[in-house]
């Protein structure tokens, strides 16, 4: 029965590849490929589900593919199937089938028709990989696919300012969740000294024995998992991104942010529940996050003027309750609640355009005074204060900017003296000196050798900070992003003795895709004359092929699973020791800001209104 699991990954992969080959003018064929592949997936799963139940619903695990193996490290693809996977796949396959069928007519003659179905099938592939994942590494592959497909669907109307702006905002939150998962994988490697599978995590004796002697490591891993889940499921303080994600088409809003993608944080908690089950402090923290989110999101939902925003905050409040249920150990109730919330929000979002039309008509003929609510029993000052806070969304956006993004931008602006010439004349010779010191490592004094990994990692962080805040030269920003990866590789090389093949594996994708991206920017510079980062240029309108190639280059440089760098990033972190907190902090911050700088370059150069457009554009949403 185990070998059947791989076919549930191959079906959406095959559908996605076929859809890429169909010309954009063939709307009927495109839509048929989409709903046929998803439909086959749904029907075949129902047959498999009956067979699985008939045989006593065993837990299945398929350890099939080993991508990389060394003396103390193994990167493997592992598939896992149990009741949690069954519920998520049933809900996901049914709703994706309904939405793809609905979208055939909803998006008829839309210029991005092919792009929409390509992205939805890509999303469904990532969703399937995530819920079938048998270890953190496999889950992270699907997790990354979900993130980039979310960005592409929010920015579906890429010739408008707001969808692109909000897509970058959402991706910035997703990036925090990505690095939280990377850090959980990093410390998990040191805890288990292997690539632990979820099947082994369900072994109570194994987990309890390890956590008895490594309780603080267990808490760290659990908190990193929680941060990833909070970012993906829009829990506080990350809740403000979900309404902004509604800038995409209504079908993508329904399937992503109403039903499937937004519940991935819940799935992560359910899948790792055996690990943190006996950590009382973590369970209390998860429940507290869910309770606070439910309270605040309920108030925000009730004062929204946009129906999509109202549905978004209502969904956030329900997911907060699911967090409480998971923390309490009521995982069957959490699964039932997930299915009900997913079906309800999908329905609400799909009918929302019609509801708006009915409400506009009815308000002229049937005025109904506001009914008394619970808030009316409160003192008026408290009632009005809560109302204003909910209307301002509890200043969550301001909170994120003040304590997260503004300090990063401030640090980057302090590096204004760094020009291309100074980078090339100072940092590259220093890098060459670092390579020489690495070659003659035995001659370096021990106290200097101990500090070099942190110093080189800090230099890499400085590179990417400057890249993130660069406002003029796109090519300089791109070069700094590439240099950051080389400094990270050098710092880890000094940290531990290992085979240079590990560094080559990490830098191979960076080098190839870095050059590819640089030549794309150079070609665009020759064609258009200016590609500064001070505004959106929208060059994908005139240069779609260059835009596509550059997007692939961005994915390769950011460690997406199309390049060996994806394995290399995880491998690099295994060479950071569990007591090297500063080195892990600098490296993880580099990866967060690195992804933001890359997606910012792509969005500013290729997305948004065309720079030569004579038409006005909206800069604020409702």
Image (cartoon, rainbow, N blue to C red):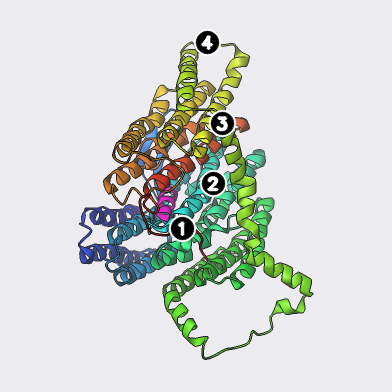
Is residue 310 visible in the rendered structure shown here?
A: yes
Q: Nearer the viewer, residue 181 or 360?
A: 360
Rendered-image quadrant of the N terminus: bottom left
Label 3, label 4: how many angstroms apart (C-alpha)?
34 Å
Q: Which one is in front in this view, the residue at disc 2 or the one at disc 4?
A: 2
Q: Which residue is mark 2?
A: 176
Q: Vertical placement of 432 versus 306: above or below?
A: above
Pointers 2 and 4 in contact (C-beta within 8 Å): no
Q: Secondary structure at mark 2?
A: helix
**Rendered image: mark on residue 466:** none
Closer to the N terminus: mark 1 or mark 2? 1
Q: What segment carries the magenta color? A: 141-152
Label 1, label 3: how many angstroms apart (C-alpha)?
29 Å
Q: Which residue is mark 4?
A: 442
CA neighbours of label 3 inside 10 A, class few (<14), some (14 to 19), many (20+): some
Question: In the image, what residue occupies the spot 39% across and 48% down?
Answer: 537
Question: In the image, what residue occupies the spot 54% across and 28% down?
Answer: 417
Q: Which one is in front in this view, the residue at disc 2 or the one at disc 3?
A: 3
Q: Residue 437: x, y in percent?
A: 50, 13
Is residue 72 visible in the rendered structure shown here?
A: no
**Rendered image: mark on residue 162:** 1
Q: Which residue is mark 3?
A: 415
Q: Vertical placement of 481 versus 456: above or below?
A: below
Q: Secondary structure at mark 1?
A: helix
Instruction: Name the quadrant containing residue 240.
Output: bottom right
Closer to the N terminus: mark 2 or mark 4? 2
Label 4, label 1: how many angstroms apart (C-alpha)?
55 Å
């Amino acid at each position: 029965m185990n070998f059947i699991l791989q076919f549930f990954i191959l079906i959406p992969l095959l559908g996605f590849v076929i859809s890429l080959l169909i010309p954009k003018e063939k709307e009927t064929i495109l839509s048929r490929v989409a709903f046929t592949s998803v439909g086959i997936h749904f029907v075949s799963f129902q047959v498999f589900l009956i067979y699985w139940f008939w045989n006593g619903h065993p837990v299945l695990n398929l350890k099939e593919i080993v991508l990389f193996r060394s003396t103390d490290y193994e990167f493997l693809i592992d598939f896992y199937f149990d009741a949690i996977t069954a519920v998520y796949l049933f809900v996901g396959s049914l709703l994706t089938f309904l939405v793809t069928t609905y979208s055939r007519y909803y998006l008829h003659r839309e210029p991005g028709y092919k792009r929409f179905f390509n992205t939805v099938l890509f999303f469904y592939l990532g969703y399937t990989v995530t819920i079938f994942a048998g270890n953190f590494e496999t889950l992270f592959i699907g997790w990354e696919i979900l993130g980039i497909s979310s960005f592409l669907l929010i920015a579906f109307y890429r010739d408008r300012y707001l969808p692109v702006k909000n897509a970058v905002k959402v991706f910035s939150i997703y990036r925090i969740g990505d690095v939280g998962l990377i850090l959980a994988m990093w410390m998990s490697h040191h805890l288990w000294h292997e690539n632990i599978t979820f099947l082994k995590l369900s072994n109570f004796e194994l987990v309890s024995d390890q956590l008895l002697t490594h309780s603080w490591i267990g808490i760290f891993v659990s908190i990193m998992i929680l941060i990833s889940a909070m970012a993906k499921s829009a829990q506080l303080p990350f809740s403000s991104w979900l309404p902004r994600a509604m800038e995409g088409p209504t079908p993508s809003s329904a399937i992503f942010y109403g039903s499937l993608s937004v519940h991935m944080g819940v799935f992560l908690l359910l899948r790792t529940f055996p690990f943190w089950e006996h950590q009382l402090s973590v369970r209390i923290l998860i429940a507290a996050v869910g309770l606070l989110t439910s309270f605040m999101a309920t108030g925000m939902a009730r004062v929204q003027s946009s129906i999509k925003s109202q549905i978004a905050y209502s969904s956030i409040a329900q997911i907060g309750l699911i967090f409480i249920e998971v923390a309490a150990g009521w995982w069957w109730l959490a699964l039932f609640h997930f299915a009900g919330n997913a079906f309800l929000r999908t329905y609400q979002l799909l009918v929302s355009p019609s509801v708006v039309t009915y409400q506009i008509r009815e308000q002229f003929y049937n005025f109904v005074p506001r009914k008394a609510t619970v808030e009316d029993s409160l003192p008026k000052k408290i009632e009005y204060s809560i109302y204003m806070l909910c209307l301002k969304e509890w200043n969550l956006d301001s909170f994120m900017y003040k304590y997260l993004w503004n300090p990063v931008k401030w640090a980057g602006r302090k590096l204004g003296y760094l020009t291309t010439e100074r980078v090339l004349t100072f940092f590259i010779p220093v890098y060459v000196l670092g390579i020489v010191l690495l070659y003659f490592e035995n001659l370096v004094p021990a106290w200097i050798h101990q500090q070099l990994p942190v110093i080189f990692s800090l230099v890499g962080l400085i590179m990417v900070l400057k890249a993130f805040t660069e406002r003029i030269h796109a090519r300089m920003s791109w070069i700094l992003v590439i240099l950051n990866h080389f400094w990270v590789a050098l710092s880890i090389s000094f940290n531990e003795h290992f085979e240079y093949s590990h560094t080559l594996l990490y830098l191979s994708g960076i080098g190839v895709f870095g050059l590819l991206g640089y030549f794309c920017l150079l070609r665009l510079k020759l064609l258009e004359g200016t590609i500064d980062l001070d505004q959106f240029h929208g060059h994908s309108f005139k240069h779609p092929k260059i835009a596509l190639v550059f997007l692939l280059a961005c994915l390769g440089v950011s460690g997406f699973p199309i390049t060996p760098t994806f394995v290399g990033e995880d491998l690099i972190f295994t060479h950071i020791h569990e007591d090297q907190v500063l080195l892990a902090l600098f490296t993880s911050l580099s990866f967060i800001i690195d992804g933001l700088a890359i997606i910012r370059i792509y969005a500013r150069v290729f997305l948004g209104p065309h720079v030569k457009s004579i038409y006005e554009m909206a800069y604020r949403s409702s």
